[in-house]
Image (cartoon, coloured by chain):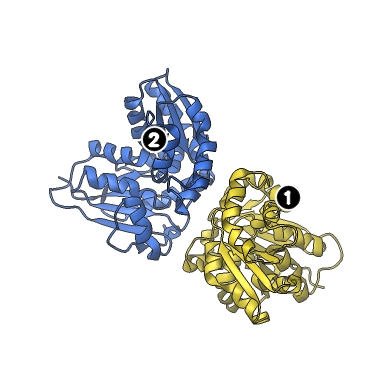
Chain colours: A blue, B yellow
């Protein structure tokens, strides 16, 4: 039994979709969440800056009593996971590996689509992992740079015409490629699930990368003692609007205020 | 004659539209430009974070030999100009005041629209200034949170369907309010000028806030000696893609690489 917390971070609040899954899968665990709301988004920044920011995020979490880190950010996971793992001794779980395992379990026709930020798609990390698991898999990846701004503008209602038009433009080729499985390679994208599912059709399985990472971490952990775990939330911009957004990503109000962190000092 | 440079900063590269105007209006002047590309966008961040970032941007420029600062960022100008002015002795010019003067000169029916980021519109700075200049002016302001992401995704072609749809949604009420003058209160927006003009109609005058600030600063300055001024560019994220974007905002290639700045250390 190990009651130390699980550290989770993301560029912003998208990673709260992973926290939600951690709560469901392991209700006993304590969680420390950091969302870098003062510097979001990471998706279009250079690898160098993403690494710099990720190191500070990890340094902040390491100040707490944690037993593992879940990187609930597709951009960090796909570009700099190796560096972060090499610099730390506790287990570090990114979203790419667990998501690829889940996609390979689900696909029947061996045709998998991947969507993510510019940085994530440019890295080729998902395709590389999928091909390691099965060299015969067929993949297609497309960057969706407007999805994060659309989610952050609260435009995830499935009948939003702008969102529908952007989805159609980004996903038409992937649908035409006849995938039966689509990896949502960014933790913001599950909020667009309904609109994406409507466009792709019911026969396509959507894989939620944050949720898969949350389920996967369980395998590495010495679990906490029975009892309800607590969660602490930290952000790098004014936490005033945190509860409103947290409800959007957690599916319920966080119930507590987030605390402000001067992340650039880590 | 004062050969010290003019410092210009913006949250990202939008402020290069002001640099372009400075070159046109005052070709002799030396310019130091800083674009906070590692932390863009500012528009949806809290006032506290905007002030913190703006202070660092100013501290960086103050390391150079400068005689004035142009804040080519609507979000900073409308929310924290007073703080920045109070903390510095050289002249500081934001975009709000010069833009409001220009709008009042242009309007014939005394009906002016204002568009900007969430932070800019929430501040009410443009309306307040316009009403100071003429208490009888009628104003309407709307935030356009997707405009910056659309520009940064390179989607400013006037026939881009997504951009057209977003413009229609954001600007319909302003058009119906029968304005004859529209303030583009964010230095990214001039890249959408053609599409905005097409929607608003030829009878509406668009006011470019960065350009107005650039023209206005001339009044305060002891000018540089005759001769072609030089420009240095600094950014806070990897400058590799700088030239490509600079061309978009400057209207021509910058011709030099930007230099990287660790802005959080200022």
Read off the chain for label 2. Answer: A
Label 2 residue SS: helix
Q: Quadrant of residue A60?
A: bottom left
Q: Is residue B86 above or below residue B72?
A: below
Tell me if I can see residue B59 in this picture: no
Q: Nearer the viewer, residue B98 or B11?
A: B98
Q: Which residue is mark 1?
A: B254
Viewport quadrant of the N terminus of chain B: bottom right
Q: Residue at x 36, y 24 (%)?
A: A107
Q: Is residue B4 above or below residue A115?
A: below
Q: Where is residue A123? Give x, y as percent.
A: 50, 35
Q: Left of A180 or right of it: where is A217?
A: left
Q: Nearer the viewer, residue A48 or A218?
A: A218
Tell me if I can see residue B107 in this picture: yes
Q: Which residue is mark 2?
A: A96
Q: Residue at x 84, y 68 (%)?
A: B225
């Amino acid at each position: 039994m190990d009651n130390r917390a699980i550290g989770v971070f993301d560029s912003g609040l998208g990673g709260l979709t992973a926290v939600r899954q951690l709560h469901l899968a392991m209700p006993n665990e304590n969680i420390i969440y950091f969302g870098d709301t003062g510097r979001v988004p990471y998706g279009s920044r250079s690898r160098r800056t993403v690494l710099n920011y990720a190191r500070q995020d990890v340094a902040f979490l390491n100040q707490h009593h944690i037993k593992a880190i879940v990187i609930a950010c597709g951009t960090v996971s796909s570009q700099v996971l190796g560096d972060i793992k090499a610099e730390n001794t506790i287990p570090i779980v990114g979203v790419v590996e667990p998501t690829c395992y889940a996609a390979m379990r689900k696909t029947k026709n061996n045709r998998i689509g991947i969507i993510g930020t510019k940085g994530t798609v440019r890295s080729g990390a998902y395709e590389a992992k999928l091909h390691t698991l099965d060299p015969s898999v067929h993949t297609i990846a497309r960057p969706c740079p407007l999805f994060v701004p659309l989610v952050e503008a609260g435009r995830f209602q499935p009948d939003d015409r702008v969102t529908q038009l952007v989805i159609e433009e980004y996903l038409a080729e992937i649908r035409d490629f006849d995938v039966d499985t689509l990896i949502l390679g960014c933790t913001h994208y599950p909020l667009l699930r309904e609109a994406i599912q409507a466009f792709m059709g019911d026969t396509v399985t959507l894989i939620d990368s944050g949720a898969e990472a949350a389920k996967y971490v369980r395998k590495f952990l010495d679990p906490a003692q029975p009892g309800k775990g607590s969660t602490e939330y930290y952000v790098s911009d004014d936490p005033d609007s945190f509860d409103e957004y947290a409800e959007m990503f957690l599916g319920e109000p966080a119930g507590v205020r987030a605390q402000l962190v001067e992340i650039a000092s880590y």
